[in-house]
Image (cartoon, grey):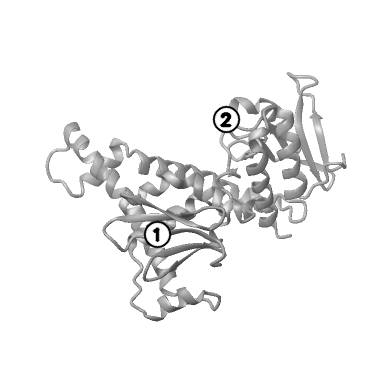
Amino acid sequence: MEFKDKVMALVEKIEKMGGNLETEEATKNALVMPFIHSVLGYDIFNPSEVVPEFTADTRTKKGEKVDYAISHDGTIQILIEAKKRGEQLTIKHASQLFRYFSCTDARIAVLTNGTVYQFFSDLDDANKMDERPFLELDLENLDDGAIPELQKLSKEQFDLDDVLSSAGEMKFSNQIKKIIQQQFREPDDELIKLLVSQVYEGKLTQAVKSDFKPIVKKALKQFLNDQINSRLQSAMNGYQEPESVTDDDRSEDEGNGIYTTEEEIEGYNLVKAMVRKILDPERVIMRDTKSYCGILIDDNNRKPLCRLHFNRSQKYLGVFDNEKNETRHPIGTINDIFAFEEHLMATASAYGY
């Protein structure tokens, strides 16, 4: 099994049983141990590889334990502290990790609640665990870019030097991404001042900045949508119809004259984002016709996810029941699709994912 497939298998497990995990022990048994064993590949039943309730006395604390210690080539390399699922992770939860980090050979410390994994090292001061993680893996909102870095910590491809060499860049790039995300949600005065000063010649009073704030927010959102739509449109321009389409779809496509609008691309993008928790986004495919824009799983007409009926004054979102019967719902704007997130997730799950 490919490493990414192992990660996705754990993601599916979280979706199925995550809501039933109400204690720390349940979280460790159902999620953390499978992460160590099935994803990272360490034998949880071999104490020479995985030591549960690992004890390493320090000068100030005796007999305290960290949940797991992972050994590679006979040396403790990774320490893991687990909390119950759903508990927000804070640096206060990592007190044992801080103490043990300095008295073992471990260079990697992990704080997790079973779904979010925060990876720390000693990038700021040698032998002292950093207060900020260099990598965060959220299995309920998976970033594919984190998977290759995680694989470097697996038993099969363990490469601590490679991890540490890129950890500094990852640490700061992740922090910068979070700042950018926050600015897109709520731009602060400094960003508003920077942008508005390029287009407004008057004095930038607080009242002026307040007036410009909604304009800046709208412009940032539109810029992001334009970038996404541009990439999707480029992909669609190179799209060729597969041979497996039905006769009905083929008759529509053969007439040409099919034009994929920006609204259809944006709608497709929203649907793909909504179901990514349980489905690899690459498996969600858009197939446009003259009558509607279909969104399919695996590009298979027998697995319709929804249809976008946008080529009319009143837009409709077509969703499917268990018998694959379509029901059209009128929508006013593209964002109204968010109201059908649970239905779309259920439809995707019904196909066995």
Across and down, in percent, residue 148 comes to 63, 55
- Note whether 130 is above or below 240 in the view shown: above
Across and down, in percent, residue 305 comes to 51, 57
Instruction: Say what amino acid the circle numbered 2 marks.
Output: Gln
Residue located 19% across and 37% down the image: 211
Check the image and name the residue furthest to the left. Answer: 202
- Note whether 45 is above or below 254 in the view shown: above
Across and down, in percent, residue 241 comes to 48, 76
Residues at discs 2 and 1 in contact (Cβ within 8 Å): no
Question: In this image, 350 relative to 196: left or right?
Answer: right
Q: Count residues near mark 2 (Cα–Cα under 10 Å), then give few for <14, some for 14-19, many for 20+.
A: few
Residue located 80% across and 21% down the image: 63
Give the Cα separation between the discs numbered 2 and 1. Answer: 37 Å
Sequence-wise, the earlier of marks 2 and 1 is 2
Question: In this image, 327 relative to 21: left or right?
Answer: left
Question: In this image, 168 relative to 32: left or right?
Answer: left
Instruction: Say what amino acid the circle numbered 1 marks.
Output: Leu
- Where residue 16 sits, quadrant-wise, is top right
Q: From the viewer's side, name the closer residue of 230 and 152.
A: 230
Residue located 34% across and 50% down the image: 331
Q: Secondary structure at mark 2?
A: loop
Q: From the viewer's side, name the closer residue of 94 and 59.
A: 94
Q: Secondary structure at mark 1?
A: strand
Tell me, yes or no, if residue 13 can be seen here: yes
Q: Which residue is mark 1?
A: 308
- Where residue 34 sits, quadrant-wise, is top right
Q: Count residues near mark 1 (Cα–Cα under 10 Å), then give few for <14, some for 14-19, many for 20+.
A: many
Q: Which residue is mark 2?
A: 88
Across and down, in percent, residue 351 comes to 61, 56
